[in-house]
Image (cartoon, rainbow, N blue to C red):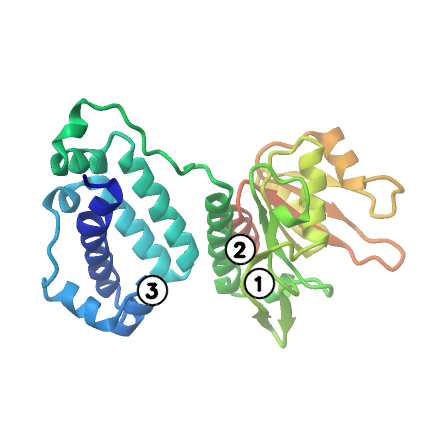
Amino acid sequence: MKFVEEVVVDEFLPTLRSMLAEDLRGRGLTQREVADALGISQSAVSKYAHGDVSRNRRVLEDERVADVVERVGEGLASGELSRVGALVELEVFVRELEDGDLLADLHEAAMPELADAEYDFAVHDPDSGLRERERTLASLRRGLRTLTAASGFSSLIPNVGSNLVECTSDADDIDDVAGIPGRIFDVKGRTTVPGDPEFGMSEHVAGVLLSARAAGADARAAVDVRYDAGLVDDLTAAGYDCVEFDPEAPTDAVADAVAAATPEGTFVLYQSGGFGIEPVLYVLGPDAPTVARVVRDLL
């Protein structure tokens, strides 16, 4: 009797790890960095590099495995994907291959009696909440890199600071929205990011995003910058719906404005200030990289 987990451990994982090690080394990571990224020893990385580990030909030649290796390798090397995020991606991938797919075939080859049996090893949900949250964080990191790499972005940061946020598909409160802890500030002309994105870190910009979604907008990301009438003109000329709201309104001004204007796709919300209220402009869209690119194009 042989369990599918044994097939995974004995045949699939050694091949997958060796492919990931090769991919990461090819991206310029040192042997130590590869070992840290994969949670293995340097000696194991050395064995993979010298072909001292037996590899399964069917796994090596499967295009889907190669695609996952490339995607996870790129994410780990760039920092877009955390080790937890990589683990979730690969766990889900393994479970998908167990469900009447490559791993099920390898399992049958190791235990022929299974060929006539009906079984289902799809025990993990590919659409798990953890997987979506890790993907949201990865998307937010990509958007953040676009902003921080944009020359002159610090000039668009309001006095209260900026934040870039992205939420899960079913977000209904702040804990479902990831943002930058402490906000993004301009320190002597330099964009300063105090920490890695986390969920539940932005009440203000996340609140604007959630209000807009509650009013029917399908946006999942938002970023705030300083308000300027010229910026509104530029964004309007670029084809974006620009919607003004009253920050001193007694009701949810964002929700009211969005419900009345019914903007689609990527759009802009802004308020020109009030008593003790700094004017601010918000770009909302489907994901963090998209809204970050809109801001970058203003520079």
Determine the residue positioned at 30% across, 42% down: 94
Q: Which residue is mark 2?
A: 296
Visible in this render: residue 66?
no
Above/below status of 277 relative to 89: below
Q: Quadrant of the C terminus?
A: bottom right
Q: Are marks 1 and 2 in contact (CB under 8 Å)?
A: yes
Residue farthest to the bottom, as pictured:
188
Determine the residue positioned at 61% across, 48% down: 177
Q: Quadrant of the N terminus?
A: top left
Provide the secondary structure element on which disc 1 rests: helix
Q: Earlier in the sequence, mark 1 or mark 2?
A: 1
- For the residue pair 36 and 12, the one nearer the viewer reads as 12
Amino acid type at mark 1: Phe
Amino acid type at mark 3: Ala
Q: Which residue is mark 1?
A: 153
Q: Which residue is mark 3?
A: 37
Could you say where residue 237 lies in the image, as x and y percent from the top left? 60, 41
Q: How many other residues sit within 10 Å of disc 3, few (<14), some (14-19) or many (≥20)?
A: some
Amino acid type at mark 2: Arg
Q: Nearer the viewer, mark 3 or mark 2?
A: 3
> What is the spatial separation of the Cα atoms under label 1 and label 3, in whole angstroms?
31 Å
